[in-house]
Image (cartoon, rainbow, N blue to C red):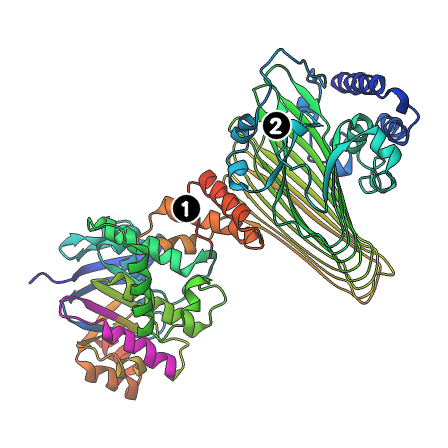
């Protein structure tokens, strides 16, 4: 079985500063991985490097996505191959409607797969169906993308886009930050509904709270640019109870 | 030297017009011409040392051997099809509207498509006879566009001949758009044209007017236009000025639009500049009775060495009036944009609300923008604001679009398009908005994406 994502000895940084100091991670089809860690440990850098954000420079290691060299692809190619990043801070784009943006996006992915563009009626009914997953109102479709949306609406819109694009690998970058408990439940419900045996999810989060709703198969702790501990979902509970200090202490001893 | 040439050209053109006025040499219109010629002589051609013309350098073209004479018979007469072709699709987009054709500054009824008898609407040539006999026209003409403050308004007024008067009676809502197609026939020579438009909107009337400027031919067109709009109480005039000439057009357009707005009326203006080598717009709106309002929008999308300059003045002369202004510019290549927005709030204009914003994106290192908001407020119980920004495209937004599978070029085009499209969202005229969106998208290589 080919893993969906195979990261080997990945090192990366921004300008001169190295942030990821050798990440190795395998994500297989059907799995949900949680990546936890204190602030500044490199969680969001990992998400950015996977999505292809230009600010970051990869200095070593490899990332294979469905057997292909991910690092060799432009951000749009990654998306077309089935990578999806749910942004921690979704961008507001006045003047671009959510519906038209998604139509372009969905059809770019379809074109890549050799499919015809979706007919307008089919597209509309698909949107309506997927909006229900995240309990979004249809009025959002005619509004400008994220423009004037509340924090919760923006995050729901991310999951709605994910539902429309049906990615092979979804990376949720602190999707839970700034969400109240109802929004958290809605967002997690959307993610769970999209889980399948052929796709995978990486949930990046600071808190265990989201993992009550999206139950992970594997939990990794990222600290100082390395994965210092991996375990089952009970690891997340232990982190919730004990904080990160004991991990920091242990990894300092090991180093 | 070049300024002498132009002055001579204006004098010669004036003499030619004067020769044709026959019995009206002492009539009110010709007296206005004489006064205007003097006003022009007094002011001269503005140089960039003049505050209002600091960035507007007319010197590179003002010395060309412009002619305002038409040489009948040397070229094929223009047809409606020619006008349509020169309009970059606008003429078709406004299908169902009525065309008022102005060729080289003169209203041409035979190329216009306004029916003879439309209840409540009169469109006629602005002649010396009409000014002499019609007091409404006489009172309005020259009352809004000041010859003393703008040398090219003076040139227009000195040479005004066969302009057009559009008159809407009280209580008339015109469903059809009036499209004033200002065509410069430059197939034979460099031409100087001075189109003059007078709009008289009666109480409680409503109308959409679109003024567009075009060229046919490859010589240089100097098109000095003036439009005056008188809005009686409780009427609505939506006046859109579009300069979207065919590629490589040599159009130089110096335009003045002035409006006076009476009680409860609304004047809405759009200035869309998409293609012409040189555009200078002066827009002056006077809110002269309480509860009047004006909305001014502008969108400039330039590339190459194009130049577009928007000077706006909103004059809050009385209390309880409202104005809003939104201008956006997108500049590529070595193009230059100017925005100068004045708002006057007179001492008696209490309870004024006036908002102005101006935003620019520069798409290349060589493009330039010069923005100057100028608020002069003499009343104390008012709400006024202005904001101006200038920057580059939001790279984070481009990354966001790319991360959804949209390639970098398309993402950039989409972002630039969306930036300008926001202005067009305020356009109620669907066919016109769609046309403008399409034209802007085409210029940017994007697809229309507005909500």
Among numbered discs 2 and 1, the one appearing first in the sequence: 2
Q: Do the residues bearing badges 2 and 1 touch, measured as CB atoms within 8 Å? A: no
**Is residue A55 visible in this depiction of the protein?**
no
Magenta segment: does it hold B2?
A: no
Secondary structure type for disc 1: loop
A188 vs A22, nearest the viewer: A188
Chain letter of disc 2?
B
Which residues fall within the magenta stretch?
A182-202
Farthest residue, direction bottom: A241
**Above or below — where is A140 with respect to B338?**
below
Decide: few, some or many residues near mark 1? Use Cα within 10 Å; few <14, some 14-19, many ≥20: some
Farthest residue, direction right: B26
Magenta segment: does it hold A189?
A: yes
Provide residue A87's location: percent of width, then percent of height: 36, 65
Q: Which residue is mark 1?
A: B447
Quarter of the view holding residue B336: top right
Provide residue B280's location: percent of width, then percent of height: 67, 36
Farthest residue, direction top: B74
Q: Which residue is mark 2?
A: B251
Residue at position x 60%, y 18% in the image: B77
Provide residue A145's location: percent of width, then percent of height: 43, 61
């Amino acid at each position: 079985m080919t893993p969906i994502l195979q990261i080997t000895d990945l090192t990366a940084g921004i300008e001169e500063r190295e942030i990821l100091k050798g990440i190795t991670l395998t994500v297989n089809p059907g799995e949900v991985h949680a990546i936890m860690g204190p602030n500044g440990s490199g969680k969001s850098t990992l998400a950015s490097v996977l999505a292809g954000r230009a600010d970051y420079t990869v200095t070593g290691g490899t990332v294979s996505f469905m057997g292909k060299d991910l690092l060799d692809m432009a951000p749009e190619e990654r998306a077309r191959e089935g990578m999806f990043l749910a942004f921690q801070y979704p961008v507001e784009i006045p003047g671009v409607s959510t519906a038209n943006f998604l139509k372009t996006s969905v059809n770019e992915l379809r074109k890549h797969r050799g499919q015809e563009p979706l007919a307008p009626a089919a597209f509309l009914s698909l949107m309506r169906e997927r909006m229900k997953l995240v309990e979004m109102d249809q009025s959002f479709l005619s509004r400008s993308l994220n423009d004037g949306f509340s924090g919760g609406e923006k995050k729901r819109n991310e999951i709605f886009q994910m539902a429309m694009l049906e990615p092979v690998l979804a990376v949720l970058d602190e999707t839970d930050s700034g969400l109240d408990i109802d929004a958290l439940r809605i967002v997690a419900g959307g993610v769970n509904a999209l889980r399948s045996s052929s796709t995978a999810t990486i949930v990046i989060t600071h808190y265990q709270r989201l993992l009550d709703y999206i139950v992970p198969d594997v939990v990794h702790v990222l600290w100082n640019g390395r994965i210092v501990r991996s375990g089952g979902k009970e690891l997340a509970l232990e982190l919730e109870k004990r904080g990160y200090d004991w991990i920091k202490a242990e990894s300092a001893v090991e180093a | 030297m070049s300024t002498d040439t132009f002055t001579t050209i204006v004098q010669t053109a004036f003499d030619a017009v004067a020769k044709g006025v026959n019995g009206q040499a002492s009539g009110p219109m010709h007296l206005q011409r004489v006064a205007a010629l003097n006003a022009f002589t007094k002011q001269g051609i503005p140089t960039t040392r003049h505050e209002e013309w600091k960035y507007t350098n007319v010197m590179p073209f003002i010395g060309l051997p412009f002619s305002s004479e038409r040489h009948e018979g040397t070229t094929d007469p223009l047809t409606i099809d020619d006008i349509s072709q020169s309009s970059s699709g606008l003429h078709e987009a406004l299908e169902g509207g009525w065309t008022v054709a102005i060729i080289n500054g003169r209203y041409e009824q035979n190329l216009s498509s306004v029916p003879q008898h439309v209840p409540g609407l009169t469109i006629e040539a602005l002649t010396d006879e009409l000014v002499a006999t019609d007091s409404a026209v006489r009172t309005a003409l020259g009352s809004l566009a000041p010859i003393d403050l703008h040398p090219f308004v003076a040139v227009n007024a000195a040479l005004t001949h066969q302009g057009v008067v559009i008159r809407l009676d009280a209580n008339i809502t015109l469903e059809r758009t009036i499209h004033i197609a200002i065509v410069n026939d430059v197939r034979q020579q460099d031409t100087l044209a001075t189109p003059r438009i007078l709009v008289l909107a009666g109480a409680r009337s409503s109308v959409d007017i679109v003024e567009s400027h075009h060229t046919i031919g490859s010589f240089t067109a100097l098109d000095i236009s003036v439009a005056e709009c008188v809005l009686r109480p409780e009427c609505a005039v939506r006046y859109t000025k579009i300069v979207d000439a065919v590629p490589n057009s040599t159009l130089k357009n110096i335009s003045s639009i002035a409006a006076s707005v009476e009680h409860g009326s609304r004047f809405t203006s759009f200035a869309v500049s998409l293609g012409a080598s040189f555009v200078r717009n002066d827009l002056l709106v006077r809110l002269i009775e309480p509860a009047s309002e004006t909305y001014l929008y502008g969108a400039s999308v330039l590339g190459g060495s194009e130049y577009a300059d928007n000077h706006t003045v909103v004059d809050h002369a009385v209390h309880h009036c409202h104005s809003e202004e939104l201008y956006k510019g997108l500049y590529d290549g070595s193009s230059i944009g100017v925005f100068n927005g004045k708002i006057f709030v007179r001492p008696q204009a209490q309870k004024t609300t006036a908002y102005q914003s101006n935003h620019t994106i520069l798409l290349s290192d060589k493009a330039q923008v010069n923005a100057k908001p100028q608020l002069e407020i003499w009343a104390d119980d008012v709400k006024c604001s202005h904001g101006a920004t200038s920057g580059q495209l939001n790279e984070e937004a481009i990354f966001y679009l790319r991360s959804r599978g949209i390639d970098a070029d398309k993402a950039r085009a989409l972002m630039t398009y969306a930036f300008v499209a926001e202005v067009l969202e305020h356009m109620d005229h669907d066919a016109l908005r769609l046309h403008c969106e399409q034209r802007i998208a085409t210029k940017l290589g994007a697809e229309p994406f507005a909500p």
